[in-house]
Structures are given as structure tokens and as C-alpha cells.
Amino acid sequence: EGTSMAANTVRLQRSGERSVNCVAFPDQAASRSANPLLRALGWCTWNSFYTDLDGNKIVSGLKKLYDSGVPKPLGFVVIDDGWQHTTNDNAQEGSQWGERLKSLAASPSKFSEKRSSASKSDLLSFEETISLLKAPSDEGGGGVHSILAWHALPGYWLGVDETSFKDFDAKTYFPKFPSGILKNDPSAAREQSVNKGIGIPENATEFFQRYHSFLSDAGVDGLKVDAQGVSGTLRQEESTDPHRYQVTLALHEALAGSIESNFGSKKSSRIIHCMCHSPEIFYNLPVLYEDRPLMRASDDYYPTNEYSHGPHIVDCAFNSLLFSQYAIPDWDMFTTADSPIIQNTSLQAIVRSISGAPIYISDVPGTSDISKLHKLVCKDGSTLVCGGPLLPVRDCILADPLLGSNALVLWNKNRVSGVLGVFRIAGSTWDYEELNYAPIDNGNATDNDSSVTEQLRAEMIESFRESDARNHQFLAYSSLQEWMRLLPDIYEPFDVNLKGRADVITVIPIININTVEIAAIGYRGMYNPGGCIVSQLILSDD
């Protein structure tokens, strides 16, 4: 309470109730301006390699991205699952969920020890990999500004190996899922963790301090911490401890303290929180960090499951109604290239352009659709990110956009303009019997690829309701169809004839200077053209 977390050892045993003070959530705009992940394009290795990665693949993969035309330099790279030393370093995608962390070092089968002149290994060391990614481009490096490394909250999917981590007082805890979770998803009872348990380092402070010290020394700048939600269900079988969320609270307090010690700041820009939709987690994050945490707003992005794309957009937008009150919602990575097994990448690219979240791809190197990226990213690699979270307009909050023919309309704001995104995503949802995303009977609704007309109004942009914009005329501009409409006020309806699955409408207050009316739209050809305008100033009315 008021002292540095790093100055206190956080253990799982707690002797009494916590004293909790009310916390004022950090300002949204200040947190956004301070977060470097919101400034430039990123790349995550997950869908590029899954767990089959090593230092050479990562470095050569970045070169292939650049050679294919991906704007450079990248702002950040996330080295996702597959780099750690686990009980089975060669576990393929899907089978790694039954493994535990074996040591604090990188996988010896994928990364060499620190390279020396006498080394004969063809592998790069973990430190060399980071160095090559970050080295200036004129020195043959990737010029990447920040590197984030992935790990699960307890270390790995099933935590740490007790024998290997006995120095950290590792013990196995078992999930006890509430009845509501089991009713919603019966497959939770068949999770490997239910029978095998999850290894938890009870000396959480020392575990994170040592682990993150290794990463920081290697040149890593921050973390993506996954698999957080299950921590709230963990109990030791013989335990009768009344502190229901002792594991969650202790791990997160130790995690925040370690980020401050090893990555130089308690700024939440040093971490992406992933799979953390448990109240005992997300209501504590604002207490632990100096600014708004970057928090995944959805399930994973599944590029090859075409039925997941509509629900993914709905999840992110509607969950952001809550999460944006104290966090910066993250929409996850996405892929840009369509293929026989990957569809709807244009839909994902368009919605990411106005999401207000970090924009980062996970393409297989060499396959990126550069035409989409040129509408998302400036030539210097910077991104035109909106100034707030992407949220449903009032008219859509009580309508299910996955049913019927009505489009989902979302709003956001740039520094000068407002934004309305129109998306046709009906036709699929989560199937509780199949436990997967699946198509649904959409009745007599029109096909998502046919033309449909939606009626919009400038007042749908909430920031216009709260300002003097009510006194303005407006210009509405379609990014994809490149038409313009003059609007006499915020209440004037205008039609959008949606010929594809999405469009972005930039709405700009018109400035009157004597007899001249001016509306600064932004960069033509970008999905979010108004994102480039930092400010506008009338120097003279002559």
C-alpha cells in the first residue's frame, strides 16, 4: 500500500484481508500517447510459425517481411509461444498445452548458448536473435524498436515443473471451475490442467524477478502474458484457505513489481495482458500499473476459421464498453493475405484501422498483402491509430449483429474527425454443442456480399454529442467508395450503400473562415485517413 512492489516479496500465503483503496483510473488520452505499441506496425510470430520457431526463423522471417514490401522499420515484434525451455520443446501446436516450464533459459534445441568465437552451432542464441532484430537497418539489422516475449502467467500452459523449480517453492494447484463456467463450456472439465494440475511458483516474486531479468538482459523490452484467467480457479487439494483468489492476486502483484524492476517502468505499455477476462484480474490491473493496461478484448484471432471473424469483431467491440473504462482494449494480431483456407482479411484490416488498438500482423513471411498494409500503415511504418476505443453506436447496443441483415455500426474518434465503421458480419456464432464457431440460419437476411443500405448520422459519434460540434456542419467521406456528403448538422441522416462487407466513414466538422468552408479529410487512400491530422489551427481569418 503505497510502497514499491519490488521492495516486498509476494508469496501465495496471505495472513489477513487486504486493505483496498479507491483508485482513480489513469486518463485514456495520456495512457495512449505514452504507449509505443500504438505508434507503429508490429509483427507477432504466432500464426507465422506457431511453436515451430527458432532464432534463425525469426530473423530471416523479418527480412522476408521487409523484402515483400512490409513497411519498415516495425515498431515491435512479439516472440510468441515456442521459444521457452519446456518439458517438451518440440511439442507442436495443440500438444504444448500439456507441458510445463523446465528452466528459465530459452529452448536449447532452438537457441544456442551465448555465441562465442569457438561456437560451432548453427543456431542463434536468444540474445543474438534480439540483437539482430533491433540493430539499425544500415547495420544489417531489423531496426525494430521494441521486442516483447510471450509467457503464460504461471510460466507455461501447465505452469512450472515442480522438480526443476523447487528453489521457488513450486507446488501443484488444481482448477476448481465454478458451475457457471462448466454450464457455459462443459469441455472445461476435460482440460488437461484438471487432472494434471498447474505448477505454481509460490515464491512468485523471486520467480518473476529471475525470469524477467534473463529476458531484460537479452534485450527484451516487455511481455505478452497469456493464460491468466485460469489462475482464479486454482486451489491446492488439501487447502482450506479462505482467500479465494490468492494465486491470482499474488502472481499479478509479483508480475507488476517485476516489470517495474526489469523493464524500467510500471507503465502498462511494457505488457499485453491476454486471456484475462476474470473480474479478480481486470479490476486489479488499474491498481497495479501507472497507466491504463493494454488488455485483450476477445478470444484469439483464428485466421483459418471463417466463422470466427464476425464474432471476433462483436466480442472486441462490445467487451470494450466495459474494458475501455479502465484499459486500452487490444484486438489481437491478424493476417493480411487471403488464401483457400484464410478468408475475410480485408474485413479484419478495415476494423483494425479504426480499433484504437495496436495494429500487428501475424503473416507467414513473404505472404503479406501489401496493398492492405499500405492502407493501414504510413511509408515510415507508423500507424494511423484512432484516439479512443472502438465501440458500438447507441442504435446497435441492443441488437445482435450476428443475426438478421442490419450492419454493425461502430464509432471512434481521431484528434479532429470522428469515425463510423459499418460492418456486415451476420451468419455465424459460437456453437455450444460443437464448441466451435459455426454458421447459423440467418432467415431471410441478405447475403453479406450483396448490396445493402444503412442510414447513419453524425450524432452517432459520441464525442460530437459532448462538444460544440452540434453547432457545425459536417463533411462525411467514405474511405472505400470515396464519396462525400455535406451534412447541415449532427442530426441529418445520410445513406451508406454498402457494396461489400465494410466501409469507414470519416466525419469532419467544417471550419468557416469568412466565405470559405474547409474540411481536412486526411490521407487519401488510407482506411482511416483522418488519423494523420494531429491538429488544425486558424492563423488568420483574412
Image (cartoon, rainbow, N blue to C red):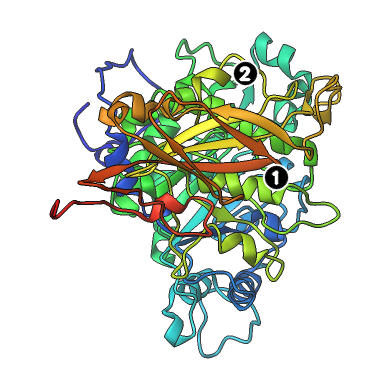
Q: Residues within 10 Å of mark 1 (few under 14, many from 20)?
A: many
Depicted 141 relative to depicted 339: above or below: below
Query: Residue 116 location in percent, x, y?
Result: 50, 85
When asked about the image quadrant of residue 89, the answer is bottom right
Look at label 1 and name its amino acid. Answer: Glu
Q: Residues within 10 Å of mark 2 (few under 14, many from 20)?
A: few
Task: Find numbered disc 1 in the image and state the secondary structure of the residue it sits on.
Answer: loop
> Where does the N terminus fall, quadrant-wise?
top left
Task: Find numbered disc 2 in the image and state the secondary structure of the residue it sits on.
Answer: loop
Query: Residue 462 location in percent, x, y?
Result: 39, 26
Residue 43 in view of the camera: yes
Look at label 2 and name its amino acid. Answer: Glu
Mark 2 highlights which residue? 237
> Where does the C terminus fall, quadrant-wise?
bottom left
Depicted 170 relative to depicted 57: above or below: above
In percent of the image, x 77 and y 49: which residue is there? 343
Query: Residue 483 location in percent, x, y?
Result: 55, 48
Tell which of 130 and 337 is nearer to you.
337
Query: Residue 67 location in percent, x, y?
Result: 62, 78
Using residue 227 as the reference point, say whether residue 487 is left or right of it.
left
Going from N to C along the chain, the mark reached first, 1 or 2, is 1
Q: Which labelled disc corresponds to residue 99? A: 1
Using residue 454 as the reference point, say whether residue 146 is left or right of it.
left
Of circles 1 and 2, the one toward us is 1
Contact, CB < 8 Å: mark 1 with mark 2?
no
Residue 51 in view of the camera: no
Task: Pick out the residue farthest to the bottom.
Answer: 117
In percent of the image, x 78 and y 29: which residue is there? 428
Tell which of 69 and 304 is nearer to you.
69
Depicted 32 relative to depicted 473: above or below: below
Tell which of 486 and 83 is nearer to you.
486
Q: CA distance from mark 1 to mark 2?
A: 21 Å
